Image (cartoon, rainbow, N blue to C red):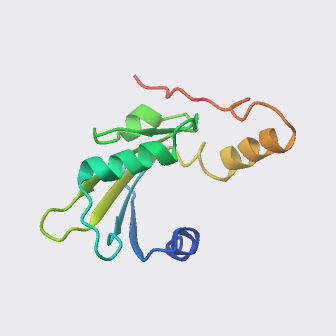
Amino acid sequence: HRHTPEIEQATGAQVLFTPHLAPMTRGILATCYARPAAGTVPSTADILGLLADAYAGEAFVTVSPRPPSTKAILGSNCAHLTARVDPRTGWVLVICALDNLVKGASGQALQCANLALGLRETAGLPTVGLYP
């Protein structure tokens, strides 16, 4: 996928990134696989804890042990994440749901403009989906 080099450059890790496009009105469900660092054997709880720590205080990111749903983020600037460790391969699997029409370039631009102008990061950006 064309975003794979960007992810690898930002994380320093080799990943397999797969966005799943399905016949739905809006939203993307993305799956990202990565090998854990050499000599480590993380658990699903370890990975969820690392993600929760990394995104603590981020208004637009939710980390949960439950699978994310594109319906839950419809119309919002949010990304919902979960993670699993495959017990057979040891690979780490992270799944993310987001509404690419809000969380995409336009939402990112507004979020960055808010920060650059000293405004609340969330100003003008929806944090609650339109579902149900």
Dividing the picture into quadrants, the one containing residue 32 is bottom left
Say if 92 sits above or below 106 in the image.
below
- Give me the residue at 36% from left, 72% from top: 37
Say if 63 sits above or below 100 in the image.
above
What is the x, y in percent for residue 89? 17, 71
Q: Is residue 30 left or right of residue 128?
A: left
Q: Is residue 31 left or right of residue 120?
A: left
- Furthest toward the top, the residue is 132
Say if 132 sits above or below 49 in the image.
above
Q: Is residue 103 left or right of residue 98?
A: right
State which quarter of the image contains the C terminus. Answer: top left
- Give me the residue at 54% from left, 77% from top: 5
Say if 83 sits above or below 6 in the image.
above
Q: Is residue 83 left or right of residue 6?
A: left
Q: Can residue 70 be seen in this snapshot?
A: yes
Dividing the picture into quadrants, the one containing residue 66 is top left
Dividing the picture into quadrants, the one containing residue 30 is bottom left
What is the x, y in percent for residue 74? 48, 35
| Residue in front for this viewpoint, 104 or 92 | 92
| Residue in front for this viewpoint, 117 or 31 | 117
What is the x, y in percent for residue 69? 35, 39
